Every structure is written in C-alpha cells, then in structure tokens.
Image (cartoon, rainbow, N blue to C red):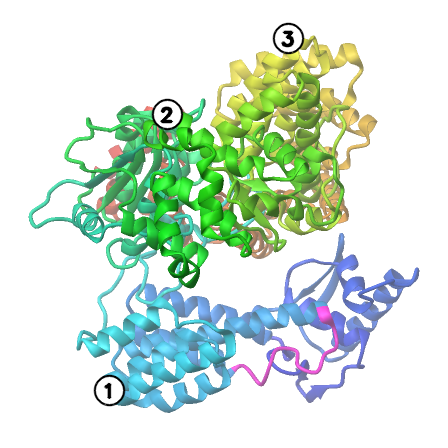
Amino acid sequence: MSPLAFRVLGPLQVHGPDGPLRLPPGRQEVILAALLLETNRVVSTNHLVDLIWEDNPPETARTQVQICVSRLRKLLAGADGEVSITTRPPGYVLHTDAANVDAALFTSLVLRARRLRDQGELGQAVELLRNAVTLWQGDCLSGLDSGPLANKARQLNEERLNAVELRIQLELELGRYDGLVGELQRLTHEHPLREKLRGQLIQALYWSGRQAEALEAFRTARRFLAEELGLEPSRELRELEAAILAGRLPAPAGAVPVRTPGEKAPHEEPARPAGVKAEEETDAAAPTATPSAESVRQDAVPHQLPAAVADFVTDAGRIAALEEALTGRPGRTTVGLAAITGKPGTGKSTLAVHVAHMLSETGFPDGQLYCDLRGTTGTPATPEEVLGRFLRALGIPGQLIPESLDERAEMYRTRLASRRVLVVLDDAAGEGQVLPLLPGSRGCAVLVTGRARLTALPGAHRVELDVLAEDQALELLSRIVGRERVAGEAAAAEALVRTVGRLPLALRIVAARLAARPHWTLASMVQRLANERHRLDELTHGEMTMRASLSLTYEGLAPEDRRLLRLLSMAQAPTLPSWLAGALLDDRRPFPSDLMEPLVDVQMLDVAGMERTGGFRYRFHEIIRVYAREQLAAEHTPETRQEALARMAGGWMHLAQQAHRTVYGGDFTVLHGDAPRWEPPASYSDEVLADPLAWLDAEQASLCGMVEHTADAGLHDLSWDLATSLVTLFEVRGHYDLWEQTHLSALAAVRKAGNLRGTAAIRASLGSLYMSRNQFDTARQALNSALDVFQALDEPMGEALCRRDMALIARTSGDDTSALELYRRSLADFDRAGDVVGRAIVLTQSAHIRMRQGEIEAAQSQLDEALDIYEGVGYTGGRARTLRRVGQLLLEQGRSDLAVLTFTEVLELCRDSGDVIGEGHLLRDLGHAFAVMGRPDRARDFYDRAVTAREGVMDFGGGALARLDLARLLDAEPGRSRELLVPAVEVFRERRMGRELAEAERLLATGS
C-alpha cells in the first residue's frame, strides 16, 4: 500500500510516512480535491477551470491549471508515494490504490455491506457500515471554498446519512433496538427532516417496551412538520402510528431469512423509473435519467392517477359497492372489475378517480395505472399503445417491449401476477378496447369508464350514472359558490339546480360563473338561464342541450378569450402547456398563462397540473372541445386556421430542436427543414429543457400528435422535421412503434407534396429504425434510396447519416472491409457538413473494428479524438459509449486493472441515467475482465448479476449470453452449468443465434 493517505471526508488532508503534508491553500487544494473525488478517473481541464474560476476565467486559466498540477506532482513525488497524476485527454488522472482515499474506501465498504445484506449476513454488514462511517471526520471537504465541489460534497454527505440509516435498519432487524434509542434521538435532533430516522426511532422505542414514548415521538414529528413545512407526516410514519395503536407492530426476529440477490429488503428505498436503451445491442447507451437494473426489475411502483376533485359529491352506497367489487368479495378467484357508464357530463371520470384514490394506499399498495383511452375522439388509443405505456411504467425498458398485442398482453399479465395494482381505464370506446388490458391476477382490479354500456365485460360490476339528486346538486353548488351565499338564496338555488337539469358539468359551469362574479345574485343567474329555457329543458336528452349550456358561458367571454378557446380546440394534446395560447394568438407576453386563466375561471378549461416552471397545464373537457371546434369552423377561414396551426407546430418544433441541441451539445447528427419556428418565452424554454429527455418523455403524446396533425394539414416541412427530431427520444427510450407511426405519416405528406429532401430524411430515419429491429434487408433498401436522393441534392449531412448506418449493418454482418470503407466516406461527409459529433460517433464505431483487427494504436487514437469531441460539446451519452470501447481496448492490451476501472466508471454512468440495458452490458464486461485476470470468483459474481439484470427486465437474449459466459466458468459444477444452459439453448434456437447455440449444446454434452 502507498505510504500516502488522502482524506476528503472532513477537511482535505494528505498524510505521508512522516506525518501530514502541508498543502498550499487555494487552487492546488481545489484541484487535488477534484482529482481525489474522481480517483483513477479522468477529470477534464475545463472542469478544473470551472472549479477555480466559476465565472469569467482568465485567458491563462488552462496554463495556470497546468502549473498547479505540476506542483502537485512534485509534492506527491517528494513524499515517496505510489501516487501519480498523469495527463490523459481531455484532462488529468490521479492514480492510486482506492484504499488510500477515504471517500473511495467508504463507497467500497458500503457496497460490500449492501451485498452482505442481500445475502442475509446482517451482522457482518453492520460491522462494515460502522467501519465506513468512522472514516468521516466532519462534513466532506469542509473549509474548502468551491461552489461546484460543494455540490459533490453534499452528495457524499447524503450517502453518509444513507449508510447510517441502513446500519440502524439492519440492527433493528437483528433485534438490537434497546441500544439504538439514544443514537436515534441525537440523529433526529440533528436531522429533523429525515422521516426515515424518525420512523426508526419510533420502532426502536416501541420494541423496547416504551409504547407511550413511541407515540409521543410520532406526535413530535407531526408537530414539527406542520409548523415548519405545513405538511403531514409520510404514509410510512402514519402507518407506524396506526399499527402501534392497533397493537399490530410485531418485533422483528433476531435474524432475517437469506434473500436472493436483487430481492428488495424491508424498508429499502424504492427503485427509480426505468431508463434508456443502448446505441445498439453491444453498446452502452447515453446517460439520461435514472436506476439500477437490479432494482427496476420488480420494484417499479406506478402512481399515475390524476388529481381527485375536492368538491366531489356522490352516493355513499355507490362508492361502497364499487369498493367491494374492486377489493374483492370472499372466495373471489378473478380480477376485480367495475364499469362506470353514463351520458356526457355525468361525472364518470370524477367518480372513478375519487374511488381509485380512496383505495390506492390500503387496497392496492403496489401501484395504480391510469390511461385515457380517448374513446370519444376520432383516434382512440389502441390496446398495443396502452400496454406499451403500462409496461414502461412497470419497469420494462421500451426496447424490450414486444411488437405484437398478444406478446405485450402476456408480458403485462406476467408483470402483474404477484402484485396488487389498480388499473383505471378512462373513456373506453367499447369492450374490444378493454379486454386485452385486463390482468390475470385476482389481486388486481380494473375500473373502466365509458359512454357505452360495456355489457360484454365478463363479471363486471356496473354503475350507470345519471343526473345528481337535488340534495347532491345543492351540495355541489354550495361547495363551489359558498354555503352562506346558497343559504341566503335557498329558493333561487333550488330553482337554479332544476334549471340546469342537475347535470354535474352544466352545474359546475354555471357555479363557476357565479363564483367568479360575487356581485351576481343566484336569482339573476336563474333569470339569465330562463331566456333559453326551451333548450335547458332538453338537458337530459343529450348533446343539443349541452351545447346550449356551453353557449351561455362562451357568450359571456371577451372576444379575445372566445378566439383563444376556438383556436385551442385545434390542439390534439391530452394536456395543454400555457405557451400554446401565445403561439395561437401570436402574443409574445412573458406569462402566456394569463391568456388561459379567463377560460379557467368559467371552467371552459381545467387546470390539469403544474409544470416545473411553476406554470400550469390545462385540459379540455371533451364536450367543450367539440363545442369549441364547431365555433372554430363557423368563425374562422381555412387560411386563418392554417396560420394558427403553423405557429403552434412551430412552437413544438422549436422546443424539440432545442431539446436535441441540449442532449447532443449542438444541432448535430440531424437534418432540419426550413419551416419557420415560433419561440415560446425564453425563460420557459430554459426551464423545461434543463432535462431535455424528461421533457420529451412528458410531451411525447403531444409531439407525436403534432407530427400527424401537420401531415394531415399539408404542413409537410414541419411534419418531417419534427418527426426526425423526435428520434432523439424514440431511439433512447426504445419507442419503435411511435418512431414508425410518426414517420409513415410524415412520409405520406412529403411524398404528396413532392418534397424530395423531406422524403429522403424520413427514409433514412426509417432505415435506422429497421436496423434497430434487426431488419437489415429492409434497412438497406431504405438507406440506399435515401442516399441516392441526398447525392443528387448534394446534401452531405444526409449522405453521412446513411453511410454511417450502412457501415453499422456491414459491421454487424461481419463485413469489416465494407464497413471501414463506408465509415471512411461517412467521416468525410460529416467533415463537409461540419458535424463534429457525427465524426465522433463514426470514430467510436470504427475503432471497434480496428480493435478486432489488432490495430490497437489506430483504435486508441480514434477513441481519444472522440472523447475530446464529446467533452468539448458536453455530450455525455457519446462519452459513455466511447469509454466502454476504451475499457475493451485496455482489456485487449492486457491492462486489466485499468479496464476494470473504466468499465466501473461507465457502469456508474448507466446506473445514474437509468440505462438498464447498458448496465447489463457493463456487468458482463466486468465479468470478462475478471475472467481474463484469472479471478473466476469475481467473474462469476458479475456474470450472475448480468443474468439477473438482463432477465429481470425480460431481456432474455442478453441473459442467455451471460448464462453462456457463466457456464464456461463452471466446468466443475455440471449441475449448475446445465441449469444455466438449458434455457439459454432455447433462446439461441428461437433467435437463430447459430454460433452461440452450437457452443451451448457442446457444453451441455460435455457436462452430461
């Protein structure tokens, strides 16, 4: 071990054989701290510059960093330590044994403890966690003045607390609660907002025989949260209180059963949402957004219900009957099923959401799925589309979701087989839309709403809604208008309820007008409605009377508000962002929500939620949208409608283009058309695009709908441009069905318009899609036809994209010679187009061929250049792919230790971003590395984890490859080897993987 030891878990310190080394304060401290936090990993020069001069660095900044690094090298070398700082583009690496850095040692101990916990070795895990926490001597990097480093320090401080909480939880499970009370009282005083610590204190007190003190600890927590934050305690704390009061909180046993790897432990934090796909089957994907594959596998808990309505009224017996139907009668052996039907405006969706929220925590703890089936629109959701959404919510990566309805339904039923989940299907068109969405487990339940009676749903409890009873209608009016106001005009209130026919939607609209105008009397509203009495009398007869009620509110709007309502009806999105109002009216005010609010006041629009900007999203009731569209057709010419649609589509296009630029560090690897953009307020764009893939995910339905809308309207330039820009989302998330659907719509539009460039762009993008589906012949045809057009148009970017994908097909097929020639020409095309990211992608992909051919120096040079490019533009996804290739190259060179470090770095990137496919690849890479190093136990561990990770998200092809790797190591264990190989053989045979099948069958024969 090196005689030097580094401490960052507290004040920055370096200890040598003769005692502490004095570090010059200032820049050298900051640089050393940054390098230590990334021990054995590259830290870019640009990052070091930003750490020292957060704003306006001097022109000599990079030189000054070089000088500081040189001085640090001399300082460390003078201490005779086995430590070095080497230059590695685009920055520097501090090389040392990880055990010499307290932060790295802490992370290693915690990881080992978690692994022991998963194996049921709780006592050993506790000791490791104690050792890990004793490494801390205060807050991380205390006393060091650097804002960006402080963020990293806060992350490590949080990990310290997580480790403490985990150790305490394990000790509770071991029955050591008596000795934990004092420590927990101190910790809850130091960290009063950490409810997990408060829950552990309550448990420790209760299990120590101090029930009254446990309840007082809960009440203290409740008072603190209410006074400081205005919040109630978490569900977990409330459940602890209820269990103590009911005497249903049994003490844990002295030990817990051994759990299988990956099984969720009690009180473990929930998994994050599932992540992204790899660039190809052999490449790790771009970091984008969230979790570990080992946790995503079974722990994704969806909570998709819309907000419940606060002023909801209904019959208590109806709710009780629905609760019984959904939660289960004694002896029930089938899925719980209920259907709520009725006329428009009777509150079907409101009742369904209310009941679902009421049952969510107690009846269905494993989550709630929700989908608007759009049954009353012209484009109802298909069962395939809904199953795709639900499977993603249940933790399945998009690229692993099958294409056929039967396979999706089978995977969906399998995923729900051991769970208690409530599925809410709103606005169903008919039974055929619902039947494929029914789970097979009796622990689940489905609540359906629709206008049709849905009588063919087997075993369903049916509720048919009609108008409100008079007392319910008066109660609803009181909640909206105010009880004193209604009581003061009781006779007028009764007359008003009767006048609107007690229909909930009509009553809400009228009550909203009264609430917005406190100077109006209820009697004056009755008088206003009386002028159209002959129409309101027909309210219970269907749509004509609903139109009359809506017209009352519509005619009360200002002219500009009426115009906005009409134009908004063109939007086909499920919810509407506020900037749409500005685009449709060509109004560039900084807060376009001000245009929406007058419509909300009279409930012609509903508030659907809040965006991260703090602004609201809005939603039409479908009947109001139909009414507004009628007014649109009557009052606007086709030309004005087309102009407004172009501005709205231009706004979506601007945001999608900015999202792509943020992901890739610029307008790289994509073609754009010339259609004008409409720019939403800059503050809005900056805020929502801080996480561009999250925004693309959230707006997926709106963006895809806009592609088809513009295609249908003849706005072909916008249609193809938006479709190809959305590949940023489709490719990363594995939305292959949406990729194809949007592109075929755009393709029809550009062909009809004779738009050659747009046609070629769509064909090239479809070629990439077919390639991702392993449909190589179809992909070649699409790419060749696009390339011919691009060559005729002299479009270098289009030529580059086509040749790059054709090279990838050749490379996958084993034709390295053709692939290298295509890569060479693609590289020249990207250079002509000035696209550096495109160049880096080609360098990374072709480096893999150079590596296979033994051209190590050429491969290294290409990978170094690609890393420089990605670092320069800030494209972290490309950096991850390239670093994986660097790790494979290091393994080829026999530098196994460095290969392991590199693979580990990319693995962390994948986990941070939620790339569960990439995580499986990296676990397998680490297995290869340890196998090469002659460490079969470590190799076996990583191969095992790779099998678990891949099969946990139903990627059985990747799992079969890892099974084959593991079987090679188990010659001495024929039983275990056979257990691994039998399912792998079936997968290889089904997927026609001849080489792998032959080897698996040979190993089976040898083992038998």
- Identity, as a three-letter code, of the amino acid under mark 3: Lys
The answer to whether residue 396 is seen in the rendering is no
Pick whichever of labels 2 and 1 is earlier in the sequence.
1
Q: Nearer the viewer, mark 2 or mark 3?
A: 3
Contact between labelled residues 3 and 1, with CB atoms less than 8 Å apart: no
The residue under label 1 is 211
Stretch of the chain drawn in magenta: 135-147
Residue reaching furthest to the right:
59
- Identity, as a three-letter code, of the amino acid under mark 2: Arg
Question: Which residue is depicted at the point 74% across and 75% down?
Answer: 76
The residue under label 3 is 752
Tell me the distance, in whole angstroms, between the alpha carbons under discs 2 and 3. 39 Å
Residue 5: image location, x then y, percent: 63, 79
Type of secondary structure dominating the magenta stretch: loop
The residue under label 2 is 991
Q: Nearer the viewer, residue 621 or 472?
A: 472
Residue 877 placement: quadrant: top right
Pick whichever of labels 1 and 3 is earlier in the sequence.
1
